[in-house]
Image (cartoon, rainbow, N blue to C red):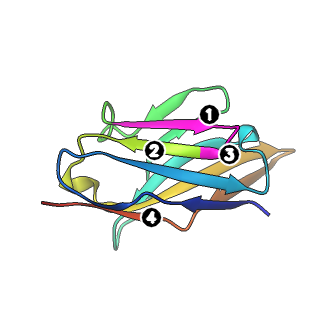
Amino acid sequence: QVQLVESGGGLVQPGGSLRLPCLASGNPLSIYHVGWYRQTPGRQRDLVGELTIGGMTNYADSVKGRFTISRDNDKNTVYLQMNNLKPEDTAAYYCNIKRSLLGRTFDYWGQGTQVTVSS
């Protein structure tokens, strides 16, 4: 059973930084593509960024140049480094890992961690 646990959320002032770790258990992280999503009340969950097994990245336009996804397969951990945070970055942030095998997609989510950007 794969489980994901995010941490590192909290209250930060505009212009500040946070790093969100996501610890995976149950399977080696190295076999999954990883990503971060965010969601505000009443809205759909949107992609923040993703990092493939091969190292390719894709980011939402709103976070390009400010956010960075990385992975440490030895620690089974995905990170989201967030710099120059803005009030509009306030959301619940969710870690996601996925892989396709024999025509099936295996897709896992963490429980989310709240990030609030406010002075």
> What kind of element bears circle 1?
loop
> What kind of element bears circle 2?
strand
The three-letter code of the residue at mark 1 reads Thr
**Distance from the alpha carbon under mark 1 to that under mark 2:** 14 Å
The residue under the point 32% across, 40% down is: 63
Q: Earlier in the sequence, mark 1 or mark 4?
A: 1
User: Which residue corresponds to mark 3?
Assistant: 76
The residue under the point 18% across, 44% down is: 15
**Distance from the alpha carbon under mark 3 to that under mark 2:** 14 Å
> What kind of element bears circle 4?
strand
User: Residue extending furthest bottom?
Assistant: 42
The three-letter code of the residue at mark 3 reads Asn
Q: Which residues are magenta?
A: 67-77
**Distance from the alpha carbon under mark 3 to that under mark 1:** 15 Å
Magenta stretch encompasses residue 71: yes
User: Which residue corresponds to mark 2?
Assistant: 80
Counting other residues with Cα less than 10 Å from the Cα at mark 1, is it few (<14), some (14-19), or many (20 or more)?
some
User: Which residue corresponds to mark 4?
Assistant: 113
The three-letter code of the residue at mark 4 reads Thr
Relative image position of residue 34 (x, y in whole percent): 60, 43
